[in-house]
Image: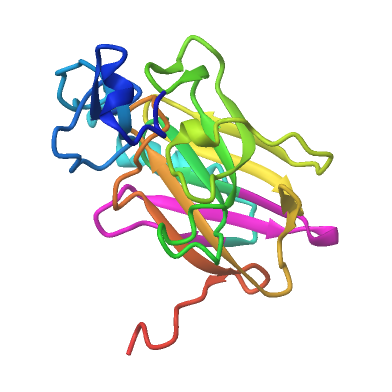
């Protein structure tokens, strides 16, 4: 990758052109494209294209009753909140606060498994609403990630903790999960229709849950592809959670 190039002469010495390109060697002549693009040396003329779709939910199979049964399997938690955007897929967070500040939680999402994540918002990030620099639990449906080819879906799914890059959002900038002595128990449930993350811990990457007060949290999901890429505008959110009282705290004036 030549993401730091600033002068076309560097590319010309290699008989290449300086263009706005991507890990998939696709180019944007005017640079006006959302996604993982940067200045690089390439003679490619391939325009941006959509990532290959993973198997999508079959509406005839993925019925409302199956969804009810899937998210109801999380019964037994003390608290339940609806995180669904009006134009997004149904998403519910269930949790209980255990001894010693441990949160036991399940995030259930009404769509197939591209990725599913939740964790702490970085309150200093004003560019991507708390995403950059956030500590998260992330479930992905494969391994051996490459920004050019995505996840190898022949590899097993995994759930790990990550710290999102402070300025770069593309997964390739923060794809290494965090190895720490801090313990977290986490797993993923997925069917041909639905996805859920389960975790139990008093922290994510050492950041403790404020179970006697509130935390700024984020969640996101992608049910379209295996590139751990854009979640779209409707299957993600930042929210303030009051763990002990079991509610999402609305910003002052929001309902006025």
**Lateral position of residue 177 relative to residue 109, left or right:** right
Q: Is residue 45 left or right of residue 212?
A: left
Please provide the residue range marked out in magenta: 80-105
- Counting from the top left corner in percent of width and height, residue 32 is at 18, 43
Q: Is residue 55 visible?
A: no
Q: Position of residue 29 (x, y in %)?
A: 14, 33
Location of the C terminus (image quadrant): bottom left
Is residue 222 found inside the magenta-colored segment of the image?
no
Rendered image quadrant of residue 86? bottom left
What is the x, y in percent for residue 38?
32, 35
Q: Is residue 252 above or below residue 249?
A: below
- State the colouring used for the structure image: rainbow
Please state which of residues 41 and 112 is positioned toward the viewer in this rendering: 41
In-image side of 96 versus 175 (left or right):
right
Say which residue appears at 64% left-offset and 52% top-offset: 76
Q: Residue at 23% x, 28% y: name it.
A: 19
Report the front residue among 184 and 38: 38
Q: Residue at x 42, y 37 (%)?
A: 170
Tally the numbered discs.
0
* Residue 139 visible in this rendered orientation of the protein: yes
Q: Is residue 84 magenta?
A: yes
Q: Quadrant of residue 2?
A: top left
Q: Quadrant of the N terminus?
A: top left
Where does the image place residue 62, in percent across and percent down from the top left? 31, 32
Q: Nearer the viewer, residue 24 or 192?
A: 24
Residue that appears at 49% across and 24% down = 141
């Amino acid at each position: 990758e030549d993401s730091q190039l600033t002068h076309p002469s560097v590319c010309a010495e290699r008989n290449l052109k300086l263009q706005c390109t991507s890990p998939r060697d696709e180019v944007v002549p005017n640079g006006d494209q959302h996604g993982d693009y940067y200045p690089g040396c390439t003679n490619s003329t391939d325009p941006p294209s959509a990532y290959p779709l993973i198997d999508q939910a079959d509406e005839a199979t993925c019925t409302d009753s199956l969804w009810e049964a899937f998210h109801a399997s999380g019964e037994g938690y003390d608290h339940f909140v609806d995180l669904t955007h009006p134009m997004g897929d149904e998403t519910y967070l269930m949790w209980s606060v255990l001894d010693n500040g441990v949160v036991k939680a399940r995030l259930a999402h009404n769509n197939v498994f591209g990725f599913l994540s939740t964790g702490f918002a970085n309150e200093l990030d004003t560019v991507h609403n708390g995403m950059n620099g956030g500590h998260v639990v992330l479930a992905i449906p494969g391994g051996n990630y490459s920004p050019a080819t995505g996840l190898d879906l022949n590899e097993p799914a995994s759930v790990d903790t990550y710290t999102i890059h402070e300025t770069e959002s593309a997964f390739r900038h923060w794809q290494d999960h965090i190895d720490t002595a801090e313990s977290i128990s986490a797993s993923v449930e997925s069917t041909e229709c639905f996805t859920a993350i389960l975790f139990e811990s008093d922290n994510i990457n050492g950041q403790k849950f404020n179970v006697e007060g509130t935390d700024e949290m984020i969640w996101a999901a992608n049910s379209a592809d295996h590139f751990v890429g854009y979640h779209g505008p409707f299957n993600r959110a930042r929210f303030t959670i009051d763990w002990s009282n079991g509610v999402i705290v609305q910003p002052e004036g929001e309902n006025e």
